[in-house]
Image (cartoon, rainbow, N blue to C red):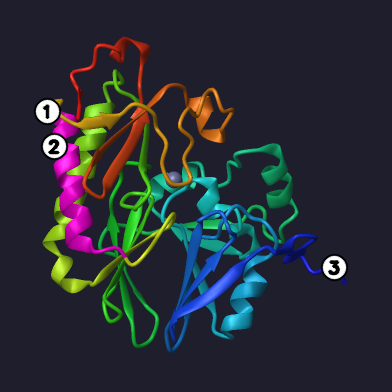
Amino acid sequence: MKNENKTSHGRVYGSWMIRSNLWVLSNGWQNFQYLLVGKEQAVLIDTGYGEGNIRSVVEEITPLPVMVINTHGHFDHTGGNGLWQQAWMGEASTKDCKKAFSQEQSLKAASKPYPNYETRILTDGATIELGNETLEVMTIPAHHDGSIAILAHKNRLLFTGDEFESGQVLIFKQKTNPEFLPTIQRHLANALRLLNRSSEYDYLFPAHNGYMLDPDRYLNDFIHLDQQILNGTAHFQSDTAGFNYPSDPVASGSVFGKFGRQKRVFYGAASIVYLDDVSDASTEVTVR
Ligand SMILES: [Zn+2]
């Protein structure tokens, strides 16, 4: 029988243990799914693009029932949902969680056992009991309207999806879009809220590029960066090059290029890429 998790160039997923109850599952694209195992049930945070069969990887690790949670509705976090009958997420994620980025992904999603899986909503403050661990949901919309952070109280970890990460936070709105500044204001408010609770966790676990980030350093740097974007003093670099990010997404034909011209601004460890309208050429943002 064909093994869905093996290809001519190796395994689809790598999985490794951070603690006896916490695993990272990765498809090699710096895309991290986390499996946190309690005494009574496990939680899988995000399901990747939908390659292979991530459920079978999960079931090799734990025999417990698994609750699937998506940090937000982008398809690189929801593509494997259809291997389960239901997936939990923030309300706004229910609108796009089944929208694949490509036809190839669409076909893969359609071939899963539950392509029309049920979406269940997690609201701000919701708690989930895993047995010997309680998760708390905090809504943190900015990169995506449906983003949630998940605080694992006993393990003292905070899962932040694409809202706070080490590579770049993507805000795919034009700077002239009336929603641009309110989105940055929300990102700032979310960072302040999470920082206010940083005594309750030791590390941030984002969905891309790196994990076990220092919360105080990252959140403070994002707070500075958001404030600088809001007051027009953010530093930017001449191209958008970053870890796993092309220097010119449009010219290079990158998947990120379809959104148009982009700009990367940064402060310390924090970096944000947003859409840069042509009318933004005389930007007030200053070069370092
Ligand atoms: Zn995303």
Q: CB under 8 Å between callouts 1 and 2?
A: yes
SS class of the residue under badge 3? Answer: loop
Q: CA distance from mark 1 to mark 2?
A: 6 Å
Q: In the rendered view, tell whether residue 152 sits above or below residue 232.
A: below
Report if residue 139 is visible in the image. yes
Q: Which residue is mark 2?
A: 227
- Residue range in magenta is 213-231
Residue 133 numbered mark, or none = none
Q: Nearer the viewer, residue 213 or 123?
A: 213
Instruction: Tell me the quadrant of the picture where the C terminus can be found.
Output: top left
Does 103 appear above or below 41?
above
Q: What residue would you read off at disc 1?
A: 231
SS at circle 2: helix
The answer to whether residue 194 is seen in the rendering is no
User: In screen coordinates, is 264 left or right of 247?
Assistant: left
Based on the displayed image, in which of its 4 quarters is residue 232 positioned? top left
Residue pictured at 65% horizontal, 63% vertical = 83
Q: Which residue does the image show at 50% across and 64% down from the upper left?
A: 33
